[in-house]
Amino acid sequence: MERMVASLSTAGMGMAPGAARGKVLRLVLREAALLAGLGAFLGLPSGYALGRLVEAQLFGVRAHHPLTFAAARTTLLTAALLAG
């Protein structure tokens, strides 16, 4: 929440002196893409490792399906960029 308030404050300061609306939008989307990319970069190996743990604990459960991983990553990155 604090980061969102700081982002809104930064956008407001950029708009006040006459910064172009597109430039402020690019700034916000760039930050959202950076955070989403970092989350995907850290989340993909974590998800794989936790999937192996679940697979070891539950009989007959297969935790690694590449299409599922790709769909989940795409959905989460899209949601993060739209929220940004």
Image: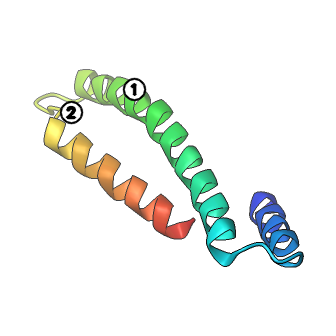
Q: Residue at x 17, y 36 (%)?
A: 66
Secondary structure category for the residue under label 2: loop
Q: Could you say where residue 18 lies in the image, as x and y percent from the top left? A: 82, 77
Q: Which mark is residue 45?
A: 1
Residue identifier under label 2: 63
Q: Could you say where residue 42 lies in the image, as x and y percent from the top left? A: 49, 31
Taking the image as shown, residue 43 lies to the left or right of residue 58, namely right
Q: Could you say where residue 28 lies in the image, as x and y percent from the top left? A: 65, 62
Tell me the quarter of the image containing the N terminus.
bottom right
Taking the image as shown, residue 38 lies to the left or right of residue 53, namely right
- Relative vertical location of residue 6 with respect to residue 40 in this rendering, above or below: below
Q: Which mark is residue 27?
A: none
Secondary structure category for the residue under label 1: helix
Q: How is the image coloured?
A: rainbow
- Relative vertical location of residue 9 with respect to residue 42 in this rendering, above or below: below
Q: Earlier in the sequence, mark 1 or mark 2?
A: 1
Is 33 or 46 nearer to us in this picture? 33
Taking the image as shown, residue 11 lies to the left or right of residue 38, namely right
Tell me the quarter of the image containing the C terminus.
bottom right
Q: Nearer the viewer, mark 1 or mark 2?
A: 1
Disc 1 and disc 2 in contact, CB within 8 angstroms: no
Q: Quadrant of residue 59?
A: top left
Q: Amino acid at mark 1?
A: Pro
Label 2: few (<14), some (14–19) or many (≥20) C-alpha neighbours in 10 Å: some
Is 33 or 41 nearer to us in this picture? 33
Q: Could you say where residue 62 lies in the image, as x and y percent from the top left? A: 14, 32
